[in-house]
Amino acid sequence: MVRDFKKIIAWQKADDLAVEVYCLTKSFPKDELYGLTSQIRRAAVSVSANIAEGSVRNHKNEYRQFLFIAKSSLTEVEYYLHLCKRLGYIDGASYQKCSQLQQEAAKVLQGLIACINKES
């Protein structure tokens, strides 16, 4: 079963998070370009990319596996946001905004996983 990933709410939330992470990291120190900047961007993009890739898989088990990878990447983003705040790369308001997007994406993604699990 092929799904249009752009219509999946979990993908939409993850896409919003990725865009926000890119905006947020533009002001990071240049010496972090290949470190934390790259890592948090990669993790944020991985969420939406795995939801998209999994959506074209024919078997639910494969789809579910991609969703779990996306969930893991969301946890990575959660940690990187925490670290960025501790290092002073982002202020409290920016942290809250991005953290809220991460939590919303995680909640919706968990709901999608639960829905797929019920169908099995």
Image (cartoon, rainbow, N blue to C red):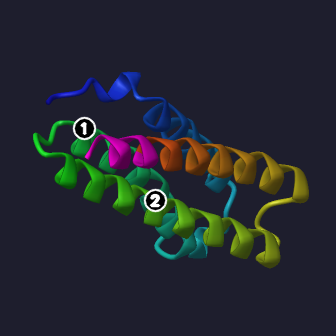
Secondary structure that dominates the magenta span: helix
> From the viewer's perspective, is residue 60 above or below residue 35?
above
Name the residue tied to disc 1: 55
**Residue range of the region highlighted in magenta in the rendering:** 113-120
Between 41 and 104, the one lying in front of the other is 104
At label 2, which amino acid type do we have? Lys
Give the farthest residue toward the right. Answer: 92
Crowding at label 1, few (<14), some or many (≥20) Cα neighbours within 10 Å? many
Where's residue 58, x and y in %? 10, 40
Indicate the quadrant where residue 61 lies: bottom left
Instruction: Tell me which label, 2 or 1, sits earlier in the chain.
Output: 1
Q: CA distance from mark 2 to mark 1?
A: 15 Å
Q: Compared with residue 78, is residue 48 higher up or lower down, i.e. above or below?
A: above
User: Which residue is drawn at the image coordinates 31% and 50% (left, top)?
Assistant: 50
Does residue 119 show up magenta in the picture?
yes
User: Which secondary structure lies at badge 1?
Assistant: helix
Q: Are marks 2 and 1 in contact (CB under 8 Å)?
A: no
At label 1, which amino acid type do we have?
Answer: Ser
Label placed on residue 71: 2
Left or right: residue 17 compared with residue 113: right
Does residue 103 appear to the left or right of 47 in the view shown? right
User: Residue 67 location, x and y as percent?
Assistant: 35, 53
Nearest the viewer among 31 and 114 is 114
Q: Is residue 55 magenta?
A: no
Q: Position of residue 54 (x, y in %)?
A: 24, 45
Element at label 2: helix
